[in-house]
Amino acid sequence: MTNTLDQIFVLLKHWIIGFLPVWLQPIVAALLSVVAILAVFPGLFAISVLLERKGLGRMQNRIGPNRVGPLGVLQPVADGIKALIKEDVIPYSADHVVHFLAPVMLVVVVFMGYAVLPMGRNMTFVPMDAGLLFYFAMGASAELTVFMAGWSSRNKYSLLGAMRAVAQMISYEVPLLMSSVVIVMMTGSLSLDKIVEVQNQYTWGLPHWFVFTPMGFAAFVMFAIAATAETNRSPFDLPEGESELVAGYFTEYSGFKFAEFFLGEYVAMLSISGLGATLFLGGWSAPLAILNVVPSWFWFFAKIMTWICFYIWMRGTFPRLRQDQLMNFAWKFVLPMTLLNLLVAGLWRFMGEGFLRWVVCSAILLSAYIIGGRIGMRSKKFGPRSYRYAE
Amino acid sequence: MVIFAILAALTVAGGLAAVMLRNTVHCALAVAVAFAGLALLFLRLNAQFAGFAQILVYVGAVAILVVFAILLTRNSETPATGVFSKTWLAGLVIAAAVFAVLAWAVIKSQAALPQEQTEPQISVAQIGNALMGRYVLPLEIVAVLLTAAMIGAVIVAMHEKGSAK
Amino acid sequence: MLGEGLLKGLAETARNFAGSFVSKERLTTVQYPEERHPLPEASRNFPFLVYDGADWEAGLRCVACQICEKECPPKCIYIEKSKDKKPDYAGKLQIYPTQFDIDISVCMSCQICVEVCPFEAIKMDNEFELATDDRFGGLLQDRKQLAKPNEYYHKIHPTEAAEVDARLAEEKAKVEEKARAAAVAAAAKAAAAAPKPAEGAQPQ
């Protein structure tokens, strides 16, 4: 019974395809998966927008929107209708073709990333051998669309926002990739399905998730930081900082195009949470062996939503990082830590099974973190601020 | 065959647009389209690693670098009218000449001979083994080159700050 | 250690989030049209006219002296005097305003009219829900709209109203005292004038 529930979507797809002639089956199978992805993830986008507004409100000692439906649940619907019926204003001197293409390309590229995520047992849309590489290729293409958006508006501030966004995304791309390479080293394959398979084993009831290993945990933390920066999310949201640049690279977009950017950003967030869950938190595997009765796709979406809640929590807590602080952090702290992490991952494989490798690897990473932190904080003067007033 | 024709047309169109358009940033974006077309051609030949690495590196980094470089030069302002640049004919002629040379080189070489239908399946693991085994010296030289480029960039940037003070 | 402050910040936000469901201190929202925050006593918005008793025309304290009209800085008050008189709180006959308009789109709530009124007739109201879609006529309040009873004044400014009432009662007592003293003096004078002809008639 639980196996049926677990595979319910796969069985549903096979049942529908059974009605069709053989030559039509592959196309319709692909179409069904595409429709499913296009239906589920924008739905999750609506839920996360609602969660964000209400969650941020509660964290800021206020209630979020609560007028539209019961407890405000129809607020995303209202937002969607508003975005659709707004007038589409394009500046006169803007580059119309590129201005139109930028949000479209962003949405296309971001949705392509979902093709390789394993959303449940046997539920990957396109099981590829180099799935991880495909995902990062799509992520890199998104940066070009951000630049296109900022440049085509012919607005100095948009261009500035786009430059900052691209610089930020490029500099955090490297730690993102390096953290994933640690996982690839431990698994020996670039295929996301294989990575989840390796994590699906249990010892004493606890799973073999990579986050529970020392360098997996370090990689997880750095992946989370880099993922927050990749999607321009607080505390790294200077490119779209509302108080600095109006809306950064999408200032000149209104109505549906703005909604597309918004959708693209949240869908990218969901997608990179999905990747993080796959790489570090075991994808669709359950936390404890006995919980395998609950279907696998439920665990995958639960992990994504947990990650989203953590993003919202971070947004409500941390102040925004300045551009130079951001870049300093990326190149001077996170990148060396990821390289050290790679070394430690190699050491892990070299040392063979046993308790010793846990101790050694954890010790190396922890000491590097503490020393790195001390060096980083050495030149700063912390303490209460002192003011000097004119006499 | 149809798919190859479409992809080839896309790549060639991107390349031609890159030499014939007036607005420099449009040219850069057309080059990015050509890169994407190339990546799709790689994927058509079942070279997954090469295709995705092409997108990751070329579209994700080189195209952005090209665009940044264009923006730092002065002729990035909007040209007045027209889609094609003034020197489109010269660009076309040079591109055709380079194409002719490359095509002659490819046709005369081994790879143009009719092959058997079985294409070798190269997996990423094999590429990794080759890089670390047989081709480790070129890999290390390229790594040293990249490091030198990075250090040079840092020094150039630092010098600018030093001289500005 | 690096990252300590981040964790403390996260803990504080989590406490806020959890606390907002259980304690009032962590959820300071007042859901506006349904609930209203009580205004402090000294809050003021636009002026209103006070009347004593039940009939607003008869009990209106304003005697159309026009001091507030002259003192108002943006000149938002317009007064027209009456031709006849009516008795005020102490019984004295006074004129009254037949038209008393305040344009609240001009009024700047400076309270000068309240400070200069010698008759405690105009006071500051604290009603703020005056929005209307008629930009000119809807914001011109006339005598009937401005007149509000003394009980309302007590409700919105209790200490002030108590003070004003005490002062007015004192004035009234003084006036009555003077009237009684005058009446006693007049009665004494009448009594002193009356027996004289009686005494004058006796020695014959």
Image (spheres, helix red, strand yellow):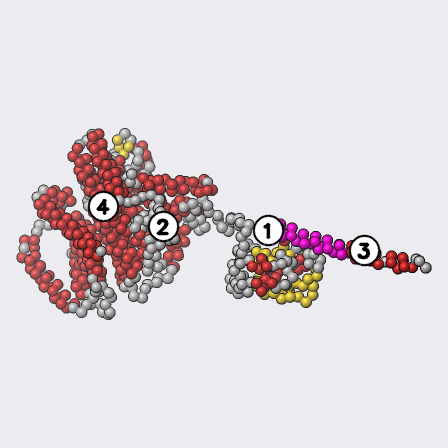
The kind of residue tagged 2 is Arg
Pick whichever, A195 or A183, lies toward us: A183
- Seen at 21% across and 54% down, the residue is B161
Q: Foreground mark, 4 or 3? A: 3
The kind of residue tagged 3 is Ala
Quote the CA–CA distance across marks 3 and 2.
80 Å
The kind of residue tagged 1 is Glu
Q: Residues within 10 Å of mark 2 (few under 14, many from 20)?
A: few
Q: Are marks 3 and 2 in contact (CB under 8 Å)?
A: no
| Quadrant into which the N terminus of chain C falls | top left
- Seen at 83% across and 56% down, the residue is C191
Query: In the image, residue C40 lies at what x, y percent?
Result: 53, 49
Query: In the image, residue A112 lies at what x, y percent?
Result: 26, 51
Quote the CA–CA distance across marks 1 and 2.
44 Å
Classify residue C145 as left or right of residue A342: right
Which is more N-terminal, label 3 or label 1? Answer: 1
Mark 1, residue position: C160
Query: In the image, residue A351 lies at what x, y percent?
Result: 17, 33
Q: Secondary structure at mark 4?
A: helix
Bounds of the magenta span?
A: C157-183
